[in-house]
Image: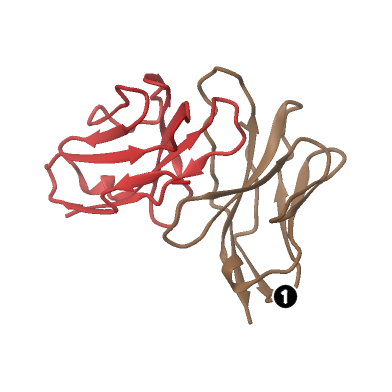
Amino acid sequence: DAKTTQPPSMDCAEGRAANLPCNHSTISGNEYVYWYRQIHSQGPQYIIHGLKNNETNEMASLIITEDRKSSTLILPHATLRDTAVYYCIVRANKANQAGTALIFGKGTTLSVSS
Amino acid sequence: GAGVSQSPRYKVAKRGQDVALRCDPISGHVSLFWYQQALGQGPEFLTYFQNEAQLDKSGLPSDRFFAERPEGSVSTLKIQRTQQEDSAVYLCASSLDSISYEQYFGPGTRLTVT
């Protein structure tokens, strides 16, 4: 799977939008962009994923550039409970094949403060 | 409904002891993954099951690591003759099938080898 590059840390004020960038310049045409987060002492939690169109759900929005070489996860109104490590992962969806594991990097530690 | 559960949550082992870590996936989930997470790092893939079949064990770091899922539900990760470098959080994740975009993670088992 392609590698991703994320800033190691970011700060955000409570109530403001948190914009987390991710570079994935070697992404292949069949690879999706996934975002997970990991709150301290918990397992990772799925947030959102997309292929090339922008996506939105109840947790966040995902903006993927037209060339698909980078993306941004947006938490529109960050709260203290959004403090976590955020992982950007690229992964192909392969039916009935091994290797569908998630390849995590070090992620971005987002600190939300009041 | 119940999520993925893991037991024990914490395990302290003396070097050379054998340990067994249990994962109870979400009922009906076909795919099960084990990951290892060292302090300050993202999770790293260990092994993958589709039902009872272990389709990928390429991430197991040595032959001291063994995983099984005999009836296609509960899985056990066994580590023989533990070493200090085995100290980590061991995460289990399940997904509905092999291409589902969402993997549901358990809280992990923190293993400390002294």
Which quadrant of the view contains residue A19? bottom right
User: Is A113 rendered above or below residue B85?
Assistant: below
Residue that lies at the very extreme toward the front in this rendered image: B1
Residue B78, image x, y percentages: 23, 34
Which quadrant of the view contains residue B81? top left
| Front-lying residue, A79 or A99 | A79
Tell me what residue is drawn at x 41 percent, y 60 percent. A41
User: Is A77 rendered above or below residue A91?
Assistant: below
User: Is A29 rendered above or below residue A83?
Assistant: above
Residue A113, image x, y percentages: 62, 78
Specify whether A31 is left or right of B11. Answer: right
What color scheme is it?
Answer: by chain
| Mark 1 neighbour density, 10 Å: few (under 14) some (14–19) many (20 or more) | some
Specify whether A102 is left or right of A49. Answer: left
| Front-lying residue, B85 or B93 | B93
The chain assigned the colour brown in the figure is: A
Q: Which quarter of the rendered picture does the C terminus of chain A lie within?
A: bottom right
Specify whether B13 is left or right of A18. Answer: left
User: Is A110 rendered above or below residue B44?
Assistant: below
Which quadrant of the view contains residue B25? top left
Chain of the residue where label 1 is placed in the rendered structure? A
List the residue tagged with mark 1. Answer: A15
Residue that lies at the very extreme toward the bottom in this rendered image: A114
Amino acid bearing label 1: Gly
Tell me what residue is drawn at x 12 percent, y 50 percent. B14
Tell me what residue is drawn at x 54 percent, y 37 percent. A102
Q: Which quarter of the rendered picture does the N terminus of chain A lie within?
A: top right
Residue A104, image x, y percentages: 54, 43
User: How many numbered marks, from 0 up?
Assistant: 1
SS at mark 1? Answer: loop
The picture's colour for chain B is red
Residue A66, image x, y percentages: 87, 40
